[in-house]
Image (cartoon, grey):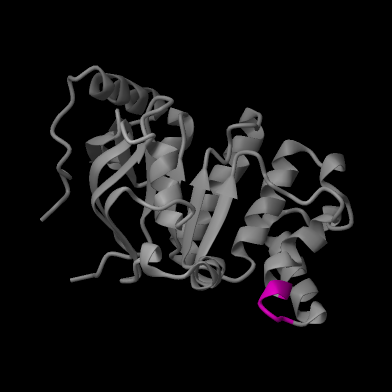
Amino acid sequence: MTEPVIRTVELKKYYSGKTKALDGVDLEVNPGEFIAVMGASGSGKSTLLHLIAGLTRPTAGRVTIEGLDPAAMSDNALTRFRRRRIGLVFQRFNLIPHLTAEENITVPLLAEGKSRKDAEKRALELAGELGIAEQLDQRPDTLSGGEQQRVTLARALSLNPAILLADEPTGNLDSLSSQRICEILDRLCRAEKRTILLVTHEPAVAVWSKRLLILKDGRLIADRPTSEFSDAHHLAAAYQRAVEGNAEPAAREDAE
């Protein structure tokens, strides 16, 4: 039996002692899965991603990544672990404005002690795969939103992480750029067997995944294979039924 690459057990995150951002989430993610997480604003989806990434600590419960607990690591050890094993992609890109696209991509590589020559070679390789080779010498403010997000994705992939966590990666993009990002994520999962956990509010994005999680008020209310849905409209209707309280139980229907 395959050991989950990500596991959460009764995971909780409270703010100000009372506000329940996450209220007891049990989750297992197997290697090579592409999972989408949907939910209304305040449902806890970004909090879940941040807890898995070790960007914040849980109030209660536990997260393990490849069998390791980020909350038990020192800050330095967690930073190294996250840089080497987890790629992070955010809606706001978080690129360094005074650096070129190539320089942004090489930041994690140089931080790991790679030579500049090797770092630039890796940046060129990734840029070619993601269709931004012609933009490597440009700074972020001269790039389109879709190009910036592909630079962000290249940076996240620079150290070849097994896990990619993406928080609304298409939120600031037009429909064509969004589709391009979805195609890239789909290829990363299918061809390279990367584990992808993606937060989105867009059914047209979620339908690219293989498994849909729905959060409401900090709790996991549905966990379904997207093969059940014929298209994004069907998925959107199922999501609406779930948040209105008319969904099937959260247990996975494809479980043994």
Q: Position of residue 16 (x, y in %)?
A: 39, 34
Tell me which residue sits at (18%, 25%) in the image. Answer: 247
Residue 103 lies in what quarter of the image? bottom right
Residue 112 highlighted magenta (yes or no): yes
Q: Position of residue 68 (x, y in %)?
A: 34, 71
* Left or right position of 160 against 142: left
Tell me which residue sits at (31%, 25%) in the image. Answer: 239
* Left or right position of 225 against 43: left
Quadrant showing the N terminus:
bottom left
Q: Visible in this render: residue 208?
A: no
* Left or right position of 141 against 159: right
Identify the main secondary structure in magenta: loop
Q: Position of residue 175 (x, y in %)?
A: 62, 29
Residue 227 lies in what quarter of the image? top left
Tell me which residue sits at (23%, 35%) in the image. Answer: 222
Q: Visible in this render: residue 252?
A: yes
- Residue lying at the far front of the rendered structure: 17
Give 213 or 185, whichever is nearer the viewer.
213
Q: Position of residue 144 (x, y in %)?
A: 78, 38
* Left or right position of 194 against 94: left
Give the magenta-colored segment's residue range: 110-114
Give 95 or 37, whichever is nearer the viewer.
95
* Residue 249, above or below 253: above
